[in-house]
Amino acid sequence: MTPNSSRFRVGVLGAGTVGAAFHALLEARADAIGAEMGLRPEISGVLTRSRGDFEDILERSDLIVELIGGTDPALEYALRTLRAKRHFVTANKQLLSRHGEELFAAAGEAGAQLRFEAAVAGVVPAIRVIAETLAGAHIERVHGIVNGTTNFILTAMERTGASYEEALREAQELGYAEADPTEDVTGRDAAAKMAILARLAFGAPVGLDDVPFEGIESVTAEDIAYARELGLSLKLIGSAERVDGGLSVQVYPAFLYSGHPLAAVNGSFNAVTIESPDITEITLSGPGAGGSQTASAVLGDVISAMIPPPFNSPPAKPMPLVTDRESAFYLHVEVADRPGVLAQVAEILGMQGVSLESLVQKGIGEDARLAMVMHPVLESRFRAAVGLIGRLDFVRSAPRVIRVISETFE
Ligand SMILES: NC(=O)c1ccc[n+]([C@@H]2O[C@H](COP(=O)([O-])OP(=O)(O)OC[C@H]3O[C@@H](n4cnc5c(N)ncnc54)[C@H](OP(=O)(O)O)[C@@H]3O)[C@@H](O)[C@H]2O)c1
Protein backbone atom coordinates (compact mmCIF):
# COMPACT_ATOMS: atom_id res chain seq x y z
CA MET A 1 0.00 0.00 0.00
CA THR A 2 1.29 3.47 -0.88
CA PRO A 3 1.89 5.70 2.18
CA ASN A 4 -0.68 8.46 1.57
CA SER A 5 -3.54 6.54 -0.01
CA SER A 6 -6.73 6.17 1.97
CA ARG A 7 -9.09 3.24 1.66
CA PHE A 8 -12.17 2.67 -0.52
CA ARG A 9 -14.07 -0.23 1.01
CA VAL A 10 -15.73 -2.72 -1.37
CA GLY A 11 -18.19 -5.33 -0.09
CA VAL A 12 -18.69 -8.27 -2.46
CA LEU A 13 -21.90 -10.31 -2.64
CA GLY A 14 -21.23 -13.67 -4.34
CA ALA A 15 -18.00 -15.61 -4.78
CA GLY A 16 -18.81 -17.74 -7.84
CA THR A 17 -17.35 -17.49 -11.37
CA VAL A 18 -17.38 -13.68 -11.51
CA GLY A 19 -17.20 -12.99 -7.76
CA ALA A 20 -14.01 -15.02 -7.28
CA ALA A 21 -12.42 -13.50 -10.41
CA PHE A 22 -13.33 -9.98 -9.23
CA HIS A 23 -11.85 -10.63 -5.80
CA ALA A 24 -8.57 -11.85 -7.34
CA LEU A 25 -8.43 -8.98 -9.85
CA LEU A 26 -9.08 -6.30 -7.25
CA GLU A 27 -6.37 -7.67 -4.98
CA ALA A 28 -3.90 -7.83 -7.87
CA ARG A 29 -4.64 -4.25 -9.01
CA ALA A 30 -5.28 -2.50 -5.66
CA ASP A 31 -1.79 -1.10 -5.12
CA ALA A 32 -1.55 0.32 -8.64
CA ILE A 33 -5.02 1.89 -8.40
CA GLY A 34 -4.20 3.30 -4.95
CA ALA A 35 -0.94 4.81 -6.22
CA GLU A 36 -2.69 6.42 -9.18
CA MET A 37 -5.87 7.63 -7.48
CA GLY A 38 -4.78 8.21 -3.90
CA LEU A 39 -7.60 5.90 -2.88
CA ARG A 40 -6.93 2.17 -2.51
CA PRO A 41 -9.83 -0.25 -3.09
CA GLU A 42 -10.01 -3.04 -0.50
CA ILE A 43 -12.41 -5.93 0.02
CA SER A 44 -14.33 -5.18 3.21
CA GLY A 45 -16.33 -8.42 3.29
CA VAL A 46 -17.67 -11.27 1.15
CA LEU A 47 -21.18 -12.73 1.30
CA THR A 48 -22.20 -16.19 0.03
CA ARG A 49 -24.96 -18.51 1.18
CA SER A 50 -22.67 -19.95 3.81
CA ARG A 51 -20.59 -17.00 5.00
CA GLY A 52 -20.82 -13.30 5.75
CA ASP A 53 -23.61 -11.06 7.06
CA PHE A 54 -25.07 -8.44 4.69
CA GLU A 55 -25.78 -5.73 7.30
CA ASP A 56 -22.31 -6.09 8.73
CA ILE A 57 -20.67 -5.88 5.26
CA LEU A 58 -22.82 -2.86 4.28
CA GLU A 59 -21.85 -1.07 7.47
CA ARG A 60 -18.16 -1.50 6.62
CA SER A 61 -18.38 -0.62 2.86
CA ASP A 62 -18.38 2.48 0.63
CA LEU A 63 -19.62 0.40 -2.29
CA ILE A 64 -21.32 -2.96 -2.71
CA VAL A 65 -20.63 -5.21 -5.73
CA GLU A 66 -23.46 -7.68 -6.34
CA LEU A 67 -22.43 -10.89 -8.15
CA ILE A 68 -25.13 -13.27 -6.92
CA GLY A 69 -27.53 -13.10 -9.90
CA GLY A 70 -31.36 -13.29 -10.02
CA THR A 71 -33.62 -10.87 -8.16
CA ASP A 72 -34.08 -12.48 -4.76
CA PRO A 73 -32.24 -11.47 -2.59
CA ALA A 74 -30.27 -9.21 -5.02
CA LEU A 75 -33.06 -6.59 -5.24
CA GLU A 76 -33.36 -6.25 -1.49
CA TYR A 77 -29.58 -5.91 -1.12
CA ALA A 78 -29.48 -3.32 -3.92
CA LEU A 79 -32.20 -1.16 -2.37
CA ARG A 80 -30.72 -1.43 1.12
CA THR A 81 -27.30 -0.43 -0.26
CA LEU A 82 -28.59 2.61 -2.18
CA ARG A 83 -30.85 3.74 0.68
CA ALA A 84 -27.78 3.63 2.94
CA LYS A 85 -26.19 6.08 0.41
CA ARG A 86 -23.57 3.55 -0.68
CA HIS A 87 -22.70 2.99 -4.35
CA PHE A 88 -23.95 -0.20 -6.00
CA VAL A 89 -22.24 -2.08 -8.87
CA THR A 90 -23.76 -5.18 -10.44
CA ALA A 91 -23.40 -7.59 -13.40
CA ASN A 92 -27.02 -8.68 -13.01
CA LYS A 93 -29.21 -8.23 -16.13
CA GLN A 94 -32.27 -9.76 -14.47
CA LEU A 95 -32.16 -7.21 -11.67
CA LEU A 96 -31.77 -4.21 -14.00
CA SER A 97 -34.27 -5.35 -16.65
CA ARG A 98 -36.97 -6.12 -14.08
CA HIS A 99 -36.42 -3.45 -11.44
CA GLY A 100 -34.44 -0.74 -13.22
CA GLU A 101 -36.86 2.12 -12.46
CA GLU A 102 -36.94 1.33 -8.74
CA LEU A 103 -33.16 1.18 -8.62
CA PHE A 104 -32.59 4.36 -10.67
CA ALA A 105 -35.03 6.19 -8.37
CA ALA A 106 -33.32 4.89 -5.22
CA ALA A 107 -29.88 5.87 -6.56
CA GLY A 108 -31.15 9.33 -7.55
CA GLU A 109 -32.72 9.96 -4.12
CA ALA A 110 -29.60 8.82 -2.29
CA GLY A 111 -27.13 10.59 -4.58
CA ALA A 112 -25.34 7.24 -4.85
CA GLN A 113 -24.05 5.61 -8.03
CA LEU A 114 -25.68 2.63 -9.70
CA ARG A 115 -23.38 1.03 -12.28
CA PHE A 116 -23.95 -2.11 -14.36
CA GLU A 117 -21.56 -2.24 -17.34
CA ALA A 118 -21.06 -6.02 -16.98
CA ALA A 119 -24.82 -6.72 -17.14
CA VAL A 120 -24.82 -6.26 -20.95
CA ALA A 121 -22.30 -7.81 -23.36
CA GLY A 122 -19.68 -8.60 -20.68
CA VAL A 123 -16.60 -6.45 -21.10
CA VAL A 124 -17.90 -4.62 -24.23
CA PRO A 125 -18.43 -1.06 -22.92
CA ALA A 126 -21.89 -0.52 -24.43
CA ILE A 127 -23.45 0.97 -21.29
CA ARG A 128 -20.66 3.49 -20.77
CA VAL A 129 -20.68 4.58 -24.42
CA ILE A 130 -24.47 5.03 -24.55
CA ALA A 131 -24.87 6.67 -21.13
CA GLU A 132 -21.71 8.77 -21.05
CA THR A 133 -19.85 9.13 -24.37
CA LEU A 134 -23.08 9.58 -26.35
CA ALA A 135 -25.07 11.29 -23.58
CA GLY A 136 -25.56 14.31 -25.87
CA ALA A 137 -26.34 12.38 -29.08
CA HIS A 138 -29.82 11.58 -30.41
CA ILE A 139 -29.68 7.79 -30.69
CA GLU A 140 -31.94 6.29 -33.37
CA ARG A 141 -31.12 2.63 -33.00
CA VAL A 142 -29.10 0.20 -30.90
CA HIS A 143 -28.77 -3.32 -32.14
CA GLY A 144 -26.39 -6.12 -31.59
CA ILE A 145 -25.38 -9.63 -30.73
CA VAL A 146 -25.70 -9.68 -26.95
CA ASN A 147 -25.69 -13.42 -26.27
CA GLY A 148 -22.42 -15.31 -26.75
CA THR A 149 -23.93 -18.80 -26.38
CA THR A 150 -26.28 -18.44 -29.34
CA ASN A 151 -23.60 -16.76 -31.45
CA PHE A 152 -21.25 -19.66 -30.75
CA ILE A 153 -23.94 -22.17 -31.78
CA LEU A 154 -24.90 -20.31 -34.98
CA THR A 155 -21.24 -19.84 -35.96
CA ALA A 156 -20.57 -23.56 -35.42
CA MET A 157 -23.62 -24.48 -37.55
CA GLU A 158 -22.45 -22.16 -40.31
CA ARG A 159 -18.81 -23.33 -40.28
CA THR A 160 -19.36 -27.08 -40.01
CA GLY A 161 -22.88 -27.68 -41.28
CA ALA A 162 -23.75 -29.14 -37.83
CA SER A 163 -27.37 -29.41 -36.71
CA TYR A 164 -28.65 -27.14 -33.91
CA GLU A 165 -28.52 -30.08 -31.46
CA GLU A 166 -24.92 -30.98 -32.38
CA ALA A 167 -23.73 -27.36 -32.11
CA LEU A 168 -25.50 -26.94 -28.74
CA ARG A 169 -23.79 -30.08 -27.44
CA GLU A 170 -20.40 -28.74 -28.55
CA ALA A 171 -21.12 -25.40 -26.84
CA GLN A 172 -22.01 -27.26 -23.61
CA GLU A 173 -18.85 -29.41 -23.78
CA LEU A 174 -16.67 -26.31 -24.22
CA GLY A 175 -18.43 -24.38 -21.42
CA TYR A 176 -20.10 -21.80 -23.71
CA ALA A 177 -23.60 -23.09 -22.87
CA GLU A 178 -25.05 -24.12 -19.52
CA ALA A 179 -26.48 -27.58 -18.83
CA ASP A 180 -29.91 -25.92 -19.03
CA PRO A 181 -29.47 -23.50 -21.98
CA THR A 182 -33.10 -22.27 -22.00
CA GLU A 183 -32.45 -18.63 -21.03
CA ASP A 184 -29.89 -18.26 -23.82
CA VAL A 185 -31.38 -20.23 -26.73
CA THR A 186 -34.92 -18.88 -26.32
CA GLY A 187 -33.66 -15.28 -26.63
CA ARG A 188 -34.77 -14.38 -23.10
CA ASP A 189 -31.27 -13.49 -21.88
CA ALA A 190 -30.80 -11.19 -24.89
CA ALA A 191 -34.24 -9.63 -24.25
CA ALA A 192 -33.20 -8.63 -20.71
CA LYS A 193 -30.04 -7.00 -22.09
CA MET A 194 -31.95 -5.15 -24.82
CA ALA A 195 -34.41 -3.81 -22.22
CA ILE A 196 -31.44 -2.33 -20.33
CA LEU A 197 -29.87 -0.83 -23.47
CA ALA A 198 -33.23 0.61 -24.63
CA ARG A 199 -33.84 2.22 -21.23
CA LEU A 200 -30.50 3.98 -21.42
CA ALA A 201 -30.50 4.89 -25.12
CA PHE A 202 -34.05 6.28 -25.23
CA GLY A 203 -34.77 7.25 -21.61
CA ALA A 204 -38.04 5.26 -21.73
CA PRO A 205 -39.06 2.77 -19.04
CA VAL A 206 -38.52 -0.53 -20.90
CA GLY A 207 -38.57 -3.73 -18.84
CA LEU A 208 -38.00 -7.38 -19.72
CA ASP A 209 -41.75 -8.00 -20.09
CA ASP A 210 -41.96 -5.32 -22.83
CA VAL A 211 -39.51 -7.12 -25.13
CA PRO A 212 -40.89 -9.83 -27.46
CA PHE A 213 -38.22 -12.45 -28.13
CA GLU A 214 -37.65 -15.40 -30.44
CA GLY A 215 -34.78 -17.87 -30.08
CA ILE A 216 -32.73 -20.13 -32.31
CA GLU A 217 -34.08 -23.58 -31.35
CA SER A 218 -35.95 -24.12 -34.61
CA VAL A 219 -33.15 -22.96 -36.94
CA THR A 220 -32.03 -25.84 -39.17
CA ALA A 221 -28.71 -26.58 -40.88
CA GLU A 222 -30.70 -26.38 -44.13
CA ASP A 223 -31.79 -22.77 -43.49
CA ILE A 224 -28.18 -21.82 -42.94
CA ALA A 225 -26.97 -23.67 -46.04
CA TYR A 226 -29.60 -22.07 -48.29
CA ALA A 227 -28.90 -18.65 -46.87
CA ARG A 228 -25.20 -19.07 -47.62
CA GLU A 229 -26.12 -19.49 -51.27
CA LEU A 230 -27.90 -16.15 -51.02
CA GLY A 231 -24.85 -14.52 -49.37
CA LEU A 232 -26.42 -14.35 -45.88
CA SER A 233 -25.31 -15.38 -42.40
CA LEU A 234 -27.54 -15.93 -39.37
CA LYS A 235 -27.27 -14.07 -36.04
CA LEU A 236 -29.52 -13.68 -32.99
CA ILE A 237 -30.16 -9.94 -33.11
CA GLY A 238 -31.37 -7.69 -30.31
CA SER A 239 -32.79 -4.48 -31.70
CA ALA A 240 -34.07 -1.29 -30.07
CA GLU A 241 -35.09 1.65 -32.25
CA ARG A 242 -37.29 4.69 -32.58
CA VAL A 243 -40.27 4.07 -34.88
CA ASP A 244 -42.96 6.67 -35.67
CA GLY A 245 -42.67 8.43 -32.31
CA GLY A 246 -42.60 5.09 -30.48
CA LEU A 247 -40.09 2.46 -29.66
CA SER A 248 -39.56 -1.05 -30.98
CA VAL A 249 -37.46 -3.43 -28.85
CA GLN A 250 -37.20 -7.05 -29.98
CA VAL A 251 -34.95 -10.12 -30.16
CA TYR A 252 -35.06 -12.43 -33.18
CA PRO A 253 -32.80 -14.53 -35.39
CA ALA A 254 -32.00 -12.60 -38.57
CA PHE A 255 -29.99 -13.09 -41.72
CA LEU A 256 -27.40 -10.42 -42.48
CA TYR A 257 -25.57 -9.65 -45.71
CA SER A 258 -21.79 -9.85 -45.42
CA GLY A 259 -21.29 -6.05 -45.47
CA HIS A 260 -23.20 -5.60 -42.20
CA PRO A 261 -20.86 -4.85 -39.26
CA LEU A 262 -22.49 -7.58 -37.15
CA ALA A 263 -22.06 -10.27 -39.84
CA ALA A 264 -18.36 -10.64 -39.01
CA VAL A 265 -18.93 -11.17 -35.26
CA ASN A 266 -18.33 -14.88 -34.72
CA GLY A 267 -18.05 -17.47 -31.95
CA SER A 268 -18.87 -16.37 -28.41
CA PHE A 269 -18.10 -12.69 -29.10
CA ASN A 270 -20.73 -9.99 -28.53
CA ALA A 271 -21.14 -6.72 -30.44
CA VAL A 272 -23.34 -3.66 -30.13
CA THR A 273 -23.95 -1.13 -32.92
CA ILE A 274 -25.22 2.31 -31.96
CA GLU A 275 -26.63 4.58 -34.67
CA SER A 276 -27.23 8.30 -34.47
CA PRO A 277 -27.33 10.95 -37.20
CA ASP A 278 -24.68 12.81 -35.19
CA ILE A 279 -22.12 10.00 -35.36
CA THR A 280 -23.37 7.64 -38.15
CA GLU A 281 -22.58 4.42 -36.33
CA ILE A 282 -20.25 2.88 -33.74
CA THR A 283 -19.79 -0.87 -33.39
CA LEU A 284 -18.19 -2.22 -30.22
CA SER A 285 -17.27 -5.88 -29.97
CA GLY A 286 -15.46 -8.24 -27.61
CA PRO A 287 -15.95 -11.15 -25.20
CA GLY A 288 -19.51 -11.24 -23.89
CA ALA A 289 -18.85 -13.38 -20.81
CA GLY A 290 -16.22 -15.23 -18.81
CA GLY A 291 -15.18 -14.76 -15.19
CA SER A 292 -12.07 -12.59 -15.68
CA GLN A 293 -13.55 -10.55 -18.55
CA THR A 294 -16.72 -9.77 -16.61
CA ALA A 295 -14.68 -9.04 -13.47
CA SER A 296 -12.67 -6.49 -15.46
CA ALA A 297 -15.86 -4.61 -16.42
CA VAL A 298 -17.00 -4.72 -12.77
CA LEU A 299 -13.67 -3.30 -11.58
CA GLY A 300 -13.98 -0.52 -14.18
CA ASP A 301 -17.34 0.41 -12.64
CA VAL A 302 -15.87 0.36 -9.12
CA ILE A 303 -13.07 2.73 -10.18
CA SER A 304 -15.60 5.05 -11.90
CA ALA A 305 -17.66 5.14 -8.70
CA MET A 306 -14.55 6.16 -6.75
CA ILE A 307 -14.43 9.38 -8.78
CA PRO A 308 -17.10 12.02 -8.21
CA PRO A 309 -19.34 13.42 -9.67
CA PRO A 310 -21.79 10.54 -9.82
CA PHE A 311 -23.42 9.52 -13.08
CA ASN A 312 -27.08 8.62 -12.74
CA SER A 313 -29.65 8.03 -15.43
CA PRO A 314 -32.32 10.77 -15.74
CA PRO A 315 -35.95 9.78 -14.99
CA ALA A 316 -37.64 7.71 -17.71
CA LYS A 317 -40.42 9.11 -19.96
CA PRO A 318 -42.91 6.59 -21.39
CA MET A 319 -42.96 6.00 -25.17
CA PRO A 320 -45.43 3.82 -27.12
CA LEU A 321 -44.05 0.37 -27.91
CA VAL A 322 -44.36 -0.64 -31.57
CA THR A 323 -44.34 -4.33 -32.51
CA ASP A 324 -45.56 -4.51 -36.16
CA ARG A 325 -42.46 -3.48 -38.12
CA GLU A 326 -41.34 -3.47 -41.72
CA SER A 327 -38.62 -6.03 -42.42
CA ALA A 328 -37.25 -8.26 -45.17
CA PHE A 329 -37.90 -11.97 -44.57
CA TYR A 330 -36.55 -15.39 -45.47
CA LEU A 331 -39.19 -18.06 -46.08
CA HIS A 332 -38.47 -21.78 -46.36
CA VAL A 333 -41.20 -24.14 -47.47
CA GLU A 334 -41.33 -27.74 -48.74
CA VAL A 335 -43.84 -28.35 -51.50
CA ALA A 336 -44.91 -31.09 -53.91
CA ASP A 337 -42.76 -30.81 -57.04
CA ARG A 338 -45.46 -30.20 -59.65
CA PRO A 339 -46.35 -27.47 -62.16
CA GLY A 340 -48.08 -24.33 -60.91
CA VAL A 341 -46.88 -24.58 -57.30
CA LEU A 342 -44.50 -21.64 -57.46
CA ALA A 343 -47.12 -19.54 -59.26
CA GLN A 344 -49.64 -20.12 -56.44
CA VAL A 345 -47.11 -19.22 -53.74
CA ALA A 346 -46.15 -16.08 -55.69
CA GLU A 347 -49.83 -15.15 -56.13
CA ILE A 348 -50.49 -15.29 -52.38
CA LEU A 349 -47.38 -13.23 -51.65
CA GLY A 350 -48.46 -10.70 -54.31
CA MET A 351 -51.98 -10.44 -52.85
CA GLN A 352 -50.48 -9.41 -49.51
CA GLY A 353 -48.15 -6.90 -51.16
CA VAL A 354 -45.06 -9.08 -50.55
CA SER A 355 -42.47 -9.06 -53.34
CA LEU A 356 -39.77 -11.65 -53.88
CA GLU A 357 -36.12 -10.60 -53.97
CA SER A 358 -34.41 -13.97 -54.50
CA LEU A 359 -35.26 -17.65 -54.67
CA VAL A 360 -33.42 -20.97 -54.39
CA GLN A 361 -35.37 -24.07 -55.47
CA LYS A 362 -34.14 -27.66 -55.00
CA GLY A 363 -35.81 -30.97 -55.81
CA ILE A 364 -35.92 -33.71 -53.14
CA GLY A 365 -37.52 -36.78 -54.76
CA GLU A 366 -41.24 -36.09 -55.27
CA ASP A 367 -40.98 -32.79 -53.39
CA ALA A 368 -39.14 -29.50 -53.74
CA ARG A 369 -37.72 -27.01 -51.27
CA LEU A 370 -38.19 -23.31 -51.81
CA ALA A 371 -35.99 -20.83 -49.96
CA MET A 372 -36.97 -17.25 -50.67
CA VAL A 373 -35.92 -13.80 -49.52
CA MET A 374 -38.57 -11.05 -49.67
CA HIS A 375 -38.21 -7.30 -50.05
CA PRO A 376 -39.10 -5.35 -46.86
CA VAL A 377 -42.79 -5.55 -45.96
CA LEU A 378 -44.93 -4.95 -42.85
CA GLU A 379 -44.58 -8.07 -40.66
CA SER A 380 -48.35 -8.54 -40.22
CA ARG A 381 -48.85 -8.68 -44.02
CA PHE A 382 -46.03 -11.18 -44.45
CA ARG A 383 -47.32 -13.40 -41.61
CA ALA A 384 -50.81 -13.31 -43.19
CA ALA A 385 -49.32 -14.54 -46.50
CA VAL A 386 -47.35 -17.28 -44.70
CA GLY A 387 -50.54 -18.40 -42.94
CA LEU A 388 -52.28 -18.81 -46.31
CA ILE A 389 -49.27 -20.57 -47.90
CA GLY A 390 -49.11 -23.00 -44.96
CA ARG A 391 -52.70 -24.10 -45.72
CA LEU A 392 -52.11 -24.94 -49.43
CA ASP A 393 -52.64 -28.66 -50.12
CA PHE A 394 -49.25 -29.10 -51.82
CA VAL A 395 -47.26 -27.74 -48.86
CA ARG A 396 -45.38 -30.59 -47.17
CA SER A 397 -43.92 -28.89 -44.07
CA ALA A 398 -44.74 -25.89 -41.87
CA PRO A 399 -43.16 -22.80 -43.48
CA ARG A 400 -40.13 -21.40 -41.60
CA VAL A 401 -39.63 -17.66 -41.35
CA ILE A 402 -36.50 -15.70 -40.36
CA ARG A 403 -35.98 -11.94 -40.63
CA VAL A 404 -33.36 -10.53 -43.01
CA ILE A 405 -31.53 -7.30 -42.21
CA SER A 406 -30.81 -5.78 -45.59
CA GLU A 407 -28.62 -2.79 -44.68
CA THR A 408 -24.88 -3.24 -45.16
CA PHE A 409 -23.34 0.13 -44.09
CA GLU A 410 -20.90 0.03 -47.01
N1 LIG B 1 -20.41 -15.95 -15.58
C1 LIG B 1 -20.30 -15.02 -16.51
O1 LIG B 1 -19.55 -15.16 -17.48
C2 LIG B 1 -21.13 -13.77 -16.41
C3 LIG B 1 -21.05 -12.79 -17.44
C4 LIG B 1 -21.78 -11.59 -17.32
C5 LIG B 1 -22.59 -11.41 -16.23
N2 LIG B 1 -22.69 -12.40 -15.26
C6 LIG B 1 -23.56 -12.14 -14.13
O2 LIG B 1 -22.77 -12.14 -12.93
C7 LIG B 1 -23.56 -12.59 -11.83
C8 LIG B 1 -22.83 -13.75 -11.14
O3 LIG B 1 -22.67 -14.80 -12.08
P1 LIG B 1 -21.71 -16.06 -11.75
O4 LIG B 1 -21.56 -16.78 -13.05
O5 LIG B 1 -20.51 -15.63 -11.02
O6 LIG B 1 -22.66 -16.91 -10.76
P2 LIG B 1 -22.25 -18.17 -9.85
O7 LIG B 1 -20.95 -18.75 -10.29
O8 LIG B 1 -23.44 -19.05 -9.81
O9 LIG B 1 -22.02 -17.53 -8.40
C9 LIG B 1 -23.06 -17.03 -7.63
C10 LIG B 1 -22.55 -16.66 -6.25
O10 LIG B 1 -23.63 -16.06 -5.53
C11 LIG B 1 -23.76 -16.71 -4.26
N3 LIG B 1 -25.16 -16.72 -3.86
C12 LIG B 1 -26.22 -17.34 -4.45
N4 LIG B 1 -27.34 -17.13 -3.76
C13 LIG B 1 -26.99 -16.35 -2.71
C14 LIG B 1 -27.71 -15.81 -1.62
N5 LIG B 1 -29.03 -16.01 -1.48
N6 LIG B 1 -27.05 -15.07 -0.73
C15 LIG B 1 -25.71 -14.88 -0.83
N7 LIG B 1 -24.98 -15.36 -1.84
C16 LIG B 1 -25.60 -16.11 -2.76
C17 LIG B 1 -23.24 -18.10 -4.47
O11 LIG B 1 -22.86 -18.53 -3.20
P3 LIG B 1 -22.51 -20.06 -2.85
O12 LIG B 1 -21.06 -20.12 -3.16
O13 LIG B 1 -22.81 -20.14 -1.39
O14 LIG B 1 -23.38 -20.91 -3.70
C18 LIG B 1 -22.07 -17.86 -5.43
O15 LIG B 1 -20.91 -17.55 -4.71
C19 LIG B 1 -24.93 -12.96 -12.43
O16 LIG B 1 -25.81 -11.86 -12.30
C20 LIG B 1 -24.61 -13.20 -13.90
O17 LIG B 1 -25.73 -13.00 -14.75
C21 LIG B 1 -21.98 -13.56 -15.33
Image (cartoon, rainbow, N blue to C red):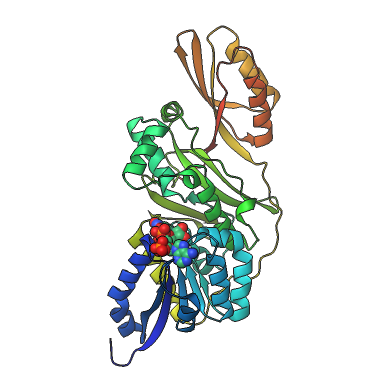
Q: Which residue is drawn at the image coordinates 44% and 75% (left, top)?
A: 304
Query: Relative to 231, is 267 above or below?
Result: below
- Quarter of the image for residue 389 reads top right
Asked whether residue 393 is in view, the answer is: yes
- Quarter of the image for residue 245 reads bottom right
Q: Is residue 373 left or right of residue 352?
A: left
Q: Which residue is drawn at the image coordinates 41% and 46% (left, top)?
A: 149
Q: Quadrant of ligand 1?
A: bottom left
Q: Which residue is drawn at the image coordinates 36% and 42% (left, top)?
A: 171
Q: Position of residue 234 (x, y in %)?
A: 45, 37
Q: Position of residue 37 (x, y in %)?
A: 36, 84
Q: Nearer the viewer, residue 16 or 293?
A: 16
Query: Relative to 142, is 24 above or below?
Result: below
Q: Is residue 235 left or right of residue 202?
A: left
Asked whether residue 139 is in view, the answer is: no
Q: Nearer the viewer, residue 245 or 398?
A: 398
Q: Position of residue 209 (x, y in %)?
A: 63, 52
Q: Please tell me how many numbered marks the rendered image carries.
A: 0
Q: Position of residue 71 (x, y in %)?
A: 55, 61
